[in-house]
Image (spheres, rainbow, N blue to C red):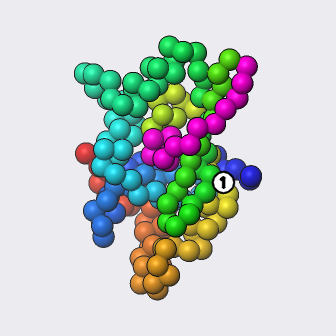
Amino acid sequence: MNLVRMNVSGIYIDPKSNVPIVVLKDKTTKNVLPIWIGPLEASSILIELEHITPPRPMTHDLFVNFLKQNNIKVRKIIITEMRNNTYFAKIYYKSGLKTKELDARPSDAISIALRLNVPVFVNKEVIENTIQTGSSSGDKDMKDYYKQLLEKLDKKDMGDTVM
């Protein structure tokens, strides 16, 4: 698997669907990968990006606390594939002497990676397929919209972040 290291650029609202998008960007090649996510997942990511400490642990904080207390080290997360317009991810971790992987939704994996300061990778094939397909429907209007959205995200003029 050919991997591209990406950073979380931010959380934006898709102006057409009003759905939050977590945007991943590659520093070197300027690849942009938007992943539509739910509002709760967006809030969890945004809280970490904004360095906000909630009064009680949120679900991702609880999971990270569990990992730390049990000496489980997350090494990286990878957005591995896209099937039927759905992204899939894996969390790679070390427990004792064994390296293991855990299936996860990309939004959960990203939220955990941010909290633990571990790298986020995307399978290059996922980036290429996302750019080429643009939508699951094959509808020309949707492909044009998707292309314009990617251009806006690349210029970072999407508008307000979620919150």
Q: Is residue 78 left or right of residue 141?
A: right
Q: Is residue 127 left or right of residue 67?
A: right
Above or below, 26 against 102 in this view is: below
Instruction: State the image coordinates of residue 46 (x, y, percent, origin top left).
Output: 35, 40
**Could you say which is closer to the camera, residue 69 or residue 116?**
69
Above or below, 79 against 97 in this view is: below
Res 147 seen here: no
- Disc 1 crowd rating (10 Å Cα; few below 14, some 14-19, many 20+) is some
**Could you say which is closer to the camera, residue 15 or residue 140?**
140
Instruction: State the image coordinates of residue 150 (x, y, percent, origin top left).
Output: 48, 67
User: Residue drawn at (46%, 86%), measured in percent from left and top?
Assistant: 140
Instruction: State the image coordinates of residue 38 (x, y, percent, origin top left).
Output: 34, 51
User: Residue drawn at (58%, 15%), measured in percent from left and top?
Assistant: 71
Q: Quadrant of residue 130?
A: bottom right
Q: Is residue 147 left or right of residue 72?
A: left
Above or below, 53 against 78 in this view is: above
Above or below, 52 against 10 in this view is: above
Res 24 seen here: yes
Q: Secondary structure at mark 1?
A: strand
User: Residue drawn at (50%, 40%), measured in percent from left and top?
Assistant: 109
User: Residue drawn at (33%, 29%), measured in percent from left and top?
Assistant: 58
Q: Which residues are magenta?
A: 97-110
Q: Which residue is mark 1?
A: 123
Q: Quadrant of residue 77?
A: top right
Instruction: State the image coordinates of residue 21 (x, y, percent, origin top left).
Output: 39, 55
Task: Give the residue type at disc 1.
Answer: Asn
